[in-house]
Image: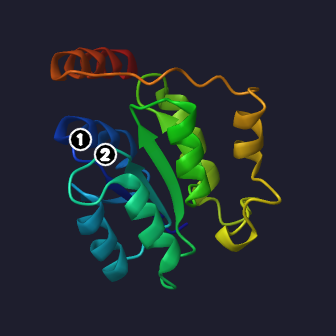
Amino acid sequence: MKRQRVMVIEDDPLFRSLIVSMIRQDYIVSVASDGSEGFYKALEFPPTVAIIDVQMPVWNGLKTLKAFRSHAALRHVKLVVLTADASKETVLAAIREGADDYLIKTSFSKEEFRSKLAKLTDPNHVQGRPTRRSMPSPKSELVAKLESEKVPVEASVEWNTDDMQATLDEMIDDWE
């Protein structure tokens, strides 16, 4: 079976390396440190899935989502938002801009991440997300769950570099 291509668009080199180390054996992985770089790399080598951080310099994640969804060559790419901002508003904004799924940096597990990625790279899996033209009705399953409060989304999380490093160290220890 041909390995699927996954792009990781993340400005934090440590977190980017962590994600790449988790998936490089199963996928062809390309990386970018901001949305603009990721978009142009994706045009050259379109991925099956792009994992996009929300808070980045140059092009943030929402602008990157819009760019992927508005370009004919990249509309088919499955987009997963990765964010430390777990506010309901941020997650909903990302989903409305075209994200197929999301991961909260402070609470996702290696198993959850690998499971979501496997589902999104499965050629037999059809995503039920409506196109931007059909928004807001009908609403995607994720938007409906978030709006009905069935999926707990934490309050916005403020991170400093020391906190992020400590969390990443704990995550790496837990996963190995």
Q: Against 137, is 165 above or below?
A: above
Element type at mark 1: helix
Element type at mark 2: helix
Q: Against 73, is 149 above or below?
A: above
Say which amino acid is labelled 2.
Val
Q: Nearer the viewer, residue 63 or 122?
A: 63
Q: How many other residues sit within 10 Å of disc 1, few (<14), some (14-19) or many (≥20)?
A: few
Q: Nearer the viewer, residue 138 or 108?
A: 138
Q: Residue drawn 52% across and 68% down?
A: 77
Question: Which residue was labeled with disc 1?
Answer: 17
- Horizontal and vertical percent for residue 105? 41, 30
- The answer to whether residue 77 is seen in the rendering is yes
Q: Residue drawn 51% across and 30% down?
A: 87
Instruction: Choose top left, top right, bottom left or bottom right for residue 169.
Output: top left
- Horizontal and vertical percent for residue 115? 59, 40
Q: Residue drawn 55% across and 59% down?
A: 97
- Horizontal and vertical percent for residue 150? 76, 26
Say which amino acid is labelled 1.
Ser
Screen quadrant of the C terminus: top left
- Horizontal and vertical percent for residue 166? 23, 14
**Distance from Cα at disc 1 to Cα at disc 2:** 5 Å
Residue at far bottom of view? 72
- The answer to whether residue 25 is seen in the rendering is no
Which disc number belongs to residue 20? 2
Residue at far right of view? 138
Q: Are marks 1 and 2 in contact (CB under 8 Å)?
A: yes
Q: Name the side, left or right, on which 50 lies relative to 76.
A: left
Q: Name the side, left or right, on which 121 lies relative to 33.
A: right
Q: How many other residues sit within 10 Å of disc 2, few (<14), some (14-19) or many (≥20)?
A: some
Instruction: Choose top left, top right, bottom left or bottom right for residue 64.
Output: bottom left
Q: Nearer the viewer, residue 90 or 3?
A: 90
